[in-house]
Image (tube, rainbow, N blue to C red):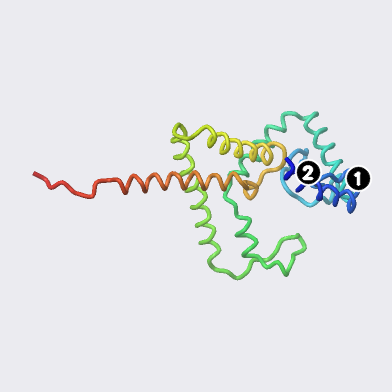
């Protein structure tokens, strides 16, 4: 607890001094909540032509929460759609790093996008990323079949982190593949366990071959 306080307290004080009262630890929560729960569009977009345009950080943060909560209250059915969209986007292959590593950030178009670098292997990198993503999902599914052999602590940690990641980025805020964070690291650990067990089983297989009679 002392470590947590020692880490967060300086950041809270910094925001209070530089940004002002109401900043807390972050002023992006209200905007991200608005991205997930509003009557017009799910996900990121420029704040032009929205009620949040032109406001300072704290007012934008507070108004984002207020408008989103009003939207949820007046249209509660839209929450299920937002949760579905967030879950779907959270589970997609993450092309974010590939996109930015193959774009020229020195030139910005009028629509806010960046031109693609003359790299001919982008399609191949995209395919490798997609194969890795679905291969990881397959290995995680195999790991779940072994859940009875897990310790209670391992089950609590893995499923707890996965649930919190889903709750934060598919239910509360807007979902995106690059927001998997710790959940993806744990998925890699689960996949590694499956591969280790398969290799161990292979190494324990008898080396001798019985000759036919």
Give the SS element for disc 2. Answer: helix
- Which comes before the other along the chain, label 1 or label 2? 1
Q: Which residue lies at the image location 49% right of the left edge and 42% below the top edge?
A: 140
Cβ–Cβ below 8 Å for labels 1 and 2? no
Q: Which residue lies at the image location 23% right of the left edge and 50% below the top edge?
A: 207
In percent of width and height, residue 173 lies at 72, 41
> In the image, is residue 80 above or below residue 101?
above
Return the residue nearer the eye: 170 or 190.
190
Q: Residues within 10 Å of mark 2 (few under 14, many from 20)?
A: some
Q: Residues within 10 Å of mark 1 (few under 14, many from 20)?
A: few
In percent of width and height, residue 108 lies at 74, 66
Cα–Cα gap, marks 1 and 2: 15 Å
Residue holding disc 1:
21
In percent of width and height, residue 162 lies at 60, 39
Total marks shown come to: 2
Q: Which residue lies at the image location 52% right of the left edge and 53% below the top edge?
A: 130
The picture quadrant where one finds residue 159 is: top right
Q: Nearer the viewer, mark 1 or mark 2?
A: 1
> In the image, is residue 70 above or below residue 181?
above
In percent of width and height, residue 72 lies at 77, 32
In the rendered view of the protein, which quadrant contains the N terminus? top right
> In the image, is residue 5 above or below residue 118?
above
Q: Which mark is residue 99?
A: none
210 relative to 180 in the view: left or right: left
54 relative to 28 in the view: left or right: right
41 relative to 210 in the view: left or right: right
In the rendered view of the protein, which quadrant contains the C terminus? top left
Residue holding disc 2:
29
Give the SS element for disc 1. Answer: loop
Q: Which residue lies at the image location 72% right of the left edge and 61% below the top edge?
A: 113
């Amino acid at each position: 607890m002392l470590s947590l306080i020692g880490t967060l307290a300086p950041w809270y004080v910094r925001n209070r001094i530089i940004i002002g009262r109401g900043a807390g630890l972050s002023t992006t929560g209200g905007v991200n909540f608005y991205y997930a729960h509003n009557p017009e569009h799910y996900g990121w977009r420029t704040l032009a032509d929205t009620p949040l345009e032109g406001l300072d950080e704290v007012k934008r943060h507070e108004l984002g929460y207020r408008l989103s909560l009003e939207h949820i209250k007046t249209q509660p059915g839209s929450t299920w759609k937002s949760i579905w969209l967030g879950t779907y986007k959270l589970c997609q292959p993450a092309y974010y790093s590939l996109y930015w590593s193959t774009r020229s950030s020195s030139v910005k178009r009028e629509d806010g996008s960046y031109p693609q670098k003359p790299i001919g292997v982008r399609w191949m990198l995209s395919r490798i990323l997609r194969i890795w993503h679905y291969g990881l999902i397959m290995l995680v599914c195999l790991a779940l079949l072994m859940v009875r052999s897990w310790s209670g602590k391992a089950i609590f940690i893995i499923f707890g982190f996965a649930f919190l990641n889903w709750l934060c980025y598919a239910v509360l805020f807007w979902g995106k593949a690059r927001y998997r964070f710790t959940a993806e690291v744990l998925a890699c650990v689960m996949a590694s366990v499956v591969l280790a067990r398969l290799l161990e089983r292979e190494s324990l297989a008898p080396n001798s071959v019985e000759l036919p009679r």
